[in-house]
Image (cartoon, grey):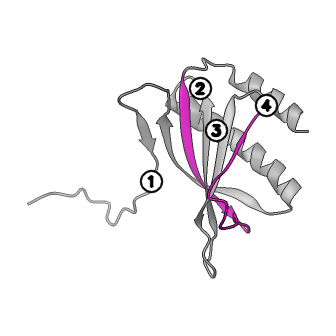
Amino acid sequence: MLNCFALHTNTMLGHNPHEAFLCDFEIESHGCLVESEKVIKSSLPTNDIEIHFKNHSVDPGVDRPLLSVQVILSSESLETARDESKTFLKGYLDYLCFVANLPLRIHKQIRVVDWTPGLKERECHQFERFPCLDSRPLHST
């Protein structure tokens, strides 16, 4: 099953391997990593995608336990990396749900960063929602 999934993902990407992007997500889960495991790293046999899991907010009694997940992949741009990472992660989480018998779902995508090796400056798209308190424009005095 994993090899078929990896082959599908590899053909889906097919981009310049020198342009890497890190896509950061929060994942809702009913499970967490044990304290001795700070980060779990996984990569496809084709080395096209690497994924890192770590605890984000899993304290006892928390309403929505969250894992922090970073997907590192090759893509053409920040925009395509955002879409491709989300598509990949949904499939990966479906597979993980089946194997671990745990519900997992993407809560939100936090950012996409140009992760190309050797850059001195990196481009980043940060995704946050800010509540609008009033529909009128703000004016400074």
Check disc 2 and give the amino acid type: Ser
Badge 4 density bin: few <14, some 14–19, many ≥20, Cα 10 Å? few
Instruction: For the residues labelled 4 and 3, say whether their Cβ atoms are less than 8 Å apart.
Output: no
Amino acid at pointer 3: Ser
Q: Position of residue 96 (x, y in %)?
A: 81, 52
Q: Quadrant of the C terminus?
A: bottom left
Image quarter for residue 120? top left
Q: Give the residue number, with chain letter if any, for mark 3.
A: 85
- The answer to whether marks 2 and 3 mark residues whose Cβ atoms lie closer than 8 Å is yes
Splitting the image into 4 quarters, where does residue 26 fall?
bottom right
Taking the view exactly as shown, the residue that stands out farthest to the front is 36
Say the numbered circle drawn on residue 93.
Answer: none
* Quarter of the image with the N terminus in it: top right
N-terminal-most mark, 3 or 1: 3
What is the crowding at mark 1: few (fewer than 14 residues within 10 Å), some, or many (at least 20)? few
Q: Which comes before the other along the chain, label 4 or label 3?
A: 4
Q: Earlier in the sequence, mark 2 or mark 1?
A: 2
Whether the magenta-drawn stretch holds residue 36 is answered as yes
Q: Nearer the viewer, mark 4 or mark 3?
A: 4
Label of residue 75 in the image: 2
Residue interval drawn in magenta: 19-44
> Looking at this view, is 20 or 34 the one in front?
34
